[in-house]
Image (tube, rainbow, N blue to C red):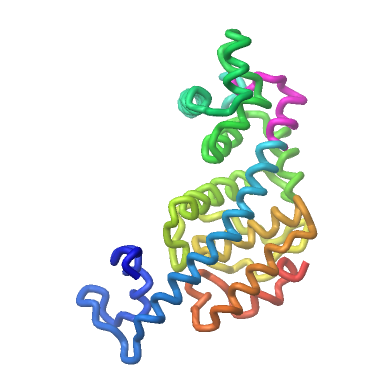
Amino acid sequence: MGTISYFRLANYFRPMETDKLSHIFKPGSLFENAIQLYEFDNSLREPIFMAIARIEIAFRTKMMHIFSLTHGAFWFLDMQKAENEHLFLENITSVDRELHRSKEDFIKEHFKKYDKPSFPPVWKTLEVVSFGVLSKMYFNFSDTKVKKAVARNFGLPQHVILESWVVSITALRNCCAHHARIWNRSYPMPPAIPKALKQAWICNTEIPANKLYAQLSCLAYMLNAIRRNNNFSQKLAELVSSYPNVDITAIGFPSNWQEEPLWNN
């Protein structure tokens, strides 16, 4: 265990402590229990990160295509199409920075061939911006009709639900990318939890929205909209069953989660 720092492991010991300040442990606490939690957390990141990658690509593609059909190839440069001027300028600054540090051949070739307009068309530009910037651009776009059209491609009735989910998923993605703890974390940007949706969804919507299970439910729902025959639910169930001593209620799982329509779709 010499390759893992104390403070990376420390949060996995906390469930075994009776006193968080003096670090007094409950009787029967074992070092192996903390290691098992760490390994579960580590294993959980992989299917989550792969799921987010698929969703990110689909969201990026749908946004480029649907927005451009109505607003052309350079809609992201038009401040009149933004809800908030300050956020628009922040987004353009981020896009410009990411374009000029991009190593993609199609971006380098574009700037060698063209000098006007100052940005490549949307189908090139949005391929190299981060998921975080992409979500901010979607959020700040003023045409709710095209935003709703994107949301419907993910089985969601309103763009505000998709906005909430994408912001929440972006935060989760960043945790996974930096190998941060995802088990027993309270997330600051919880997703909206609708009572009902078009596709198979969860019946128990009284779940803690700031815990991981809520985000996993959103991921599973969006994946099912993109590709119905995906194995995300199966991988999650197998992973949970392979760690029977891990308390999944700490990440928001209800006791009957596998009976939910979402996880049996």
Q: Looking at the image, is 244 positioned above or below residue 28?
A: above
Q: Quadrant of residue 36?
A: bottom left
- Residue occupying the point 46% across, 57% down: 187
Q: Which residue is nearer to you in this view: 116 or 59?
A: 116
For this orientation, the residue located farthest to the left is 22
**Highlighted range, magenta:** 62-77
* 37 within the magenta span: no
Frontmost residue, 175 versus 253:
175
| Residue 132, image x, y percentages | 52, 40
Viewer-closest of 4 and 199:
4
Quarter holding the N terminus?
Answer: bottom left
In this rendering, the answer to whether 61 lies above or below 249 is above
Horizontal and vertical percent position of residue 142: 62, 29
Q: Position of residue 159 (x, y in %)?
A: 67, 42
**Which residue is rendered at x = 71% and y = 22% of the image?**
71
Instruction: Work out whether 122 lies above or below 28.
Output: above
At x 70%, y 58%, the residue is 221
| Residue 253 percent across, percent down from the top left | 57, 72
Type of secondary structure dominating the magenta stretch = helix
Q: Residue at horizontal 42%, vertical 57%?
A: 180
In the foreground, 238 or 67: 238
Placement of the C terminus among the 4 image quadrants: bottom right
Q: Is residue 73 magenta?
A: yes
